[in-house]
Image: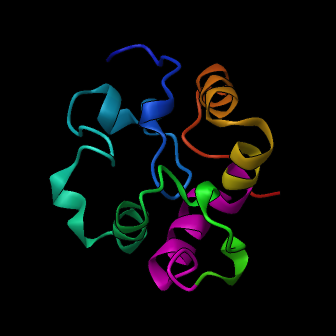
């Protein structure tokens, strides 16, 4: 398994940090940005169409976004105790570099729900 490094390019459109994902670290996934098989992801597609790196670049509050708050996202949040909205707030407030640094330091791919 590779080491977790600080790389803002490994932030997924939805706010997850692929750089700390076990599949990514084991070389079984190129990360959401590079994964052509992830064409099913509506969040990724929306960001690509708008030229955004992540949803944090959008003016819309993710809590009001039907694309970000879809059924699959809610299941993911429940199963993995993930708070992708908190990740995006952190990125907006502190920037992508700080978020990548935090996730690498915490060895987490997401901020946990409280």
Residue in the image at 77% along x and 36% along y: 94
- Is 67 situated above or below 58? below
- Left or right? Give the position of 3 relative to 61: left
**Count of numbered circles on the image:** 0
Which residue in the rendered view is the most extreme toward the front? 51
Where residue 31 appears, as percent x and y from the top left, is: 32, 41
Where residue 100 appears, as percent x and y from the top left, is: 59, 29
Q: Quadrant of residue 97?
A: top right
Q: Which residues are magenta?
A: 66-87
Where residue 33 appears, as percent x and y from the top left, is: 32, 46
Where residue 73 appears, as percent x and y from the top left, is: 51, 72
Q: Quadrant of the C terminus?
A: bottom right
**Residue 76 lies in magenta, yes or no?**
yes
- Is 51 situated above or below 3? below
Inspect this view and state whether residue 8 appears: yes
**Residue 89 lies in magenta, yes or no?**
no
Could you say which is closer to the camera, residue 36 or residue 80? Answer: 36
Residue in the image at 24% along x and 37% along y: 30
Q: How is the image coloured?
A: rainbow
Could you say which is closer to the camera, residue 24 or residue 64? Answer: 64
Which residue in the rendered view is the most extreme toward the left? 37
Residue in the image at 70% along x and 28% along y: 98
Magenta portion: prevailing SS class: helix
Q: Quadrant of the N terminus?
A: top left
- Is 64 situated above or below 107? below
Inspect this view and state whether residue 81 appears: no
- Left or right? Give the position of 105 relative to 31: right
- Left or right? Give the position of 108 relative to 39: right
């Amino acid at each position: 398994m590779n080491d977790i490094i600080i790389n803002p390019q490994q932030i997924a459109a939805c706010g997850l940090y692929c750089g700390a994902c076990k599949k990514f670290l084991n070389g079984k996934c190129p990360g959401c940005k590079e994964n052509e098989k992830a064409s099913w992801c509506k969040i990724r597609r929306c960001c690509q169409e708008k030229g955004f790196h992540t949803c944090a670049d959008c003016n819309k509050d993710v809590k009001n976004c039907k694309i970000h708050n879809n059924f699959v996202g809610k299941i993911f949040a429940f199963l993995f105790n993930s708070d992708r909205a908190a990740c995006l707030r952190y990125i907006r407030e502190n920037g992508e570099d700080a978020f990548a640094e935090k996730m690498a330091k915490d060895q987490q791919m997401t901020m946990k729900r409280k």
